[in-house]
Image (cartoon, rainbow, N blue to C red):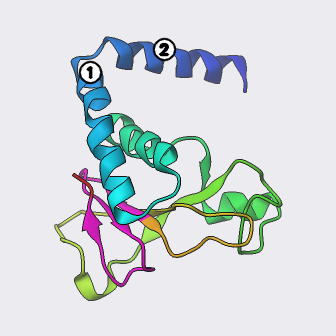
Amino acid sequence: MRPIALLRSAFIVLLLLGSPGFAQLAGDAPATAAFAERVGLRDVTGFVETVQSLRSTGHLPPRYATKDEARAHGWRGGGLCGVWPGHLIGGDHFNNFGHQLPGAPGQVYREADLDADCRGRGPKRLIFSNDGLIFVTVDHYNSFTQVP
């Protein structure tokens, strides 16, 4: 990581630690973990970290990469760990075809893989909007559950 980026990241962490909202996020972690277990996620810790990142910064954690970023590292579909260990696909636009999720003017949804492994990306996704809505699908977009 470049020194400037490292300093910026450290500054953001310090701001978050001092913000009143950080205590709220930390307090929400048990409920978020219980939700993850209830819907059948394996990587509960990663899910909690991802939801907290979205709620505090509006962005996915650095372990997520868009499909274009993954392709630049040699990804050609399937699991990402063979070409870019430690990363997951996330941040690409999600088209709300069928309007299964709430819609509003200017609202944009993005998606992120959940519980992906080296064999493939799997059916589980986190869907999040630019206005703070977060959903999980564990059956590849057939149904959605809003994250509390």
Residue carrying label 1 = 23
Label 1 Cα crowd, 10 Å radius (few <14 / some 14-19 / many 20+): few
Classify residue 92 as left or right of residue 85.
left
Work out whether residue 82 can be spotted. Answer: yes
**Magenta-colored stretch includes residue 8:** no
List x then y, in percent, for residue 135. Answer: 31, 63
Residue 25: percent from left, percent from top: 29, 31
Picture quadrant of residue 82: bottom right
Residue tagged by mark 2? Answer: 11
Among the two numbered marks 2 and 1 on one chain, the one whose residue lies closer to the N terminus:
2
Image location of residue 57, percent across then percent down: 38, 36
Q: Report the magenta residues as a range.
A: 126-146
Dot 2 amino acid type: Phe
Q: Quadrant of residue 66?
A: bottom right
Task: Classify residue 94 as left or right of residue 78.
Answer: left
Amino acid on which the number 1 mark rests in the picture: Ala
Q: Against 147, is 30 above or below? A: above
16 and 47: which is toward the camera: 47
